[in-house]
Image (spheres, helix red, strand yellow):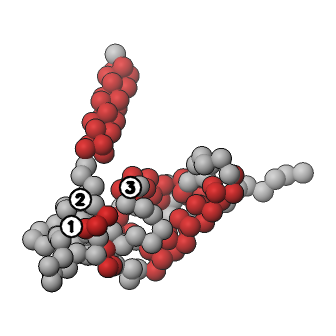
Amino acid sequence: MRNLWNVFSTLAATAIFAAVLVTVPQTPLNAQGKGGAAKGGGGAKAKATPFSSGGAGVVSAYNLKVLTAQNVELTMQNITLALGEGCIFCHELNDLSLDTKPKKAKALMMLEMVRDINAKFGDGKTHVTCWTCHRASTTPQLAKAAIN
């Protein structure tokens, strides 16, 4: 009975998480200023999202170079799972859009690499993700050497 309860509670938590993901408001593309921030001078203020710094005059965390506005939040959540780390592993705590951490630059290169690998298949499907190599580790997991 306990195993059944564990399965049920896991499924319920997953359903709630999925519902939250679907209902999270998206920052409109036109609300993104240069560098990801909509700043003073008559610019529209960005809508608060889970990736915003919060407070008055919310600064959008989007400084899009590789991702699109449609997939950024889901991709960020997948990256945190694949690396086993939180957002501030690559991002600055107070402004997630800044490119000051070397780990963020490396992550952008790796996102481009994954996109290029998937594009070479030519079928539009995702064959490779961050998880393919990282497996909840910040360093890619190397394959074991074949024994002949």
Side (left or right) of 82 relative to 145: left
Instruction: Tell me if residue 84 can be seen.
Output: no
- Displayed quadrant of residue 112: bottom right
Side (left or right) of 72 relative to 19: right
Q: What residue is shown with label 2?
A: 49
* Cα distance between the residues tagged 1 and 2: 9 Å
Mark toward the viewer: 2 or 3 = 3
* Cα distance between the residues tagged 2 and 3: 13 Å
Q: Which kind of residue does numbered mark 2 sit on?
A: Thr
Q: Secondary structure at mark 2?
A: loop
Q: Is residue 11 above or below residue 123?
A: above
Q: Which kind of residue does numbered mark 1 sit on?
A: Ala
Upstream in sequence: badge 1 or badge 3: 1
Mark 1 vs 2: CB contact within 8 A = yes
Q: Secondary structure at mark 3?
A: loop
Q: Which kind of residue does numbered mark 3 sit on?
A: Gln
Mark 1 vs 3: CB contact within 8 A = no
Q: What residue is shown with label 1?
A: 46
* Spot occupied by residue 55 in the image (x, y as percentages of width and height): 11, 68
Upstream in sequence: badge 2 or badge 3: 2
- Displayed quadrant of residue 71: bottom left
